[in-house]
Amino acid sequence: MHMQMQARIERQRKILTVIEKSAIDTQAALQTALSKLGMPVNQATLSRDIRELGLIKVEDEGAYRYVSRQTLPKPTTKPAALATISRFIQDITYSGNMIVVKTDSGAASYVAEAIDGLQLSQLLGSVAGDNTVFFVVNAESKAAQVVKTLRTMTQ
């Protein structure tokens, strides 16, 4: 079992190296790249590695690619930091007292954490999925104002 663990660790290191150096957009492309490096891997193992490494796909210059969550910017409570996550935000809209923020796949929790970190008094809470964040505003009349603030901060 010890040999298997070492092989897994080495394979996962190679995966991180490959996605860092190349725009890999599919598991098949990643599988091919690993084979070229002398590390053939089956689809099930590769899928498990992707999940264990926390890899996500993000849009990069009109195309998608795998990235490690560790390479994403760490959200902070500073409004200027929201500008760094703006590349993951696709749209900010609202209806009633609900704000909906659409993000790249896998980035919603990072966007939610950054916005939650602002501790805006109008926001009662948030729920983040894979590519969507829902924020509840304490009064309907304030949702448009909060959306305007968020759009300004993330431009």
Image: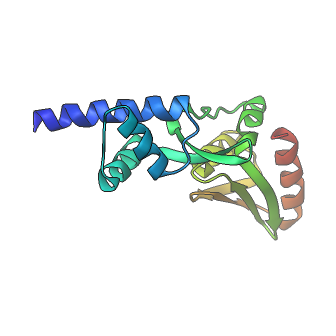
User: Along the line of sight, which residue is nearer the eye, 110 or 90?
Assistant: 90
Q: Can residue 137 be seen in this view?
A: no
Provide residue 93's location: percent of width, then percent of height.
82, 61
Provide residue 121's location: percent of width, then percent of height.
75, 48
94 lies left or right of 116: right
18 lies left or right of 23: left
User: Along the line of sight, which residue is nearer the eye, 106 or 135?
Assistant: 106
Q: Quadrant of the C terminus?
A: top right
106 lies left or right of 152: left
Provide residue 50's location: percent of width, then percent of height.
41, 46
The residue at 89%/54% (across/down) is: 145
Is the residue 88 above or below the residue 97 in the image? above
The residue at 85%/47% (across/down) is: 151
Toward the left, the furthest residue is: 1
User: Along the line of sight, which residue is nearer the eye, 6 or 43?
Assistant: 43
68 lies left or right of 7: right
Provide residue 125's location: percent of width, then percent of height.
64, 56
Q: Quadrant of residue 91?
A: bottom right
The residue at 10%/39% (across/down) is: 1
The residue at 57%/57% (across/down) is: 130
Number of callouts: 0
Q: Quadrant of residue 134?
A: bottom right
Q: Can residue 38 be seen in this view?
A: yes
Toward the bottom, the furthest residue is: 96
Q: How is the image coloured?
A: rainbow
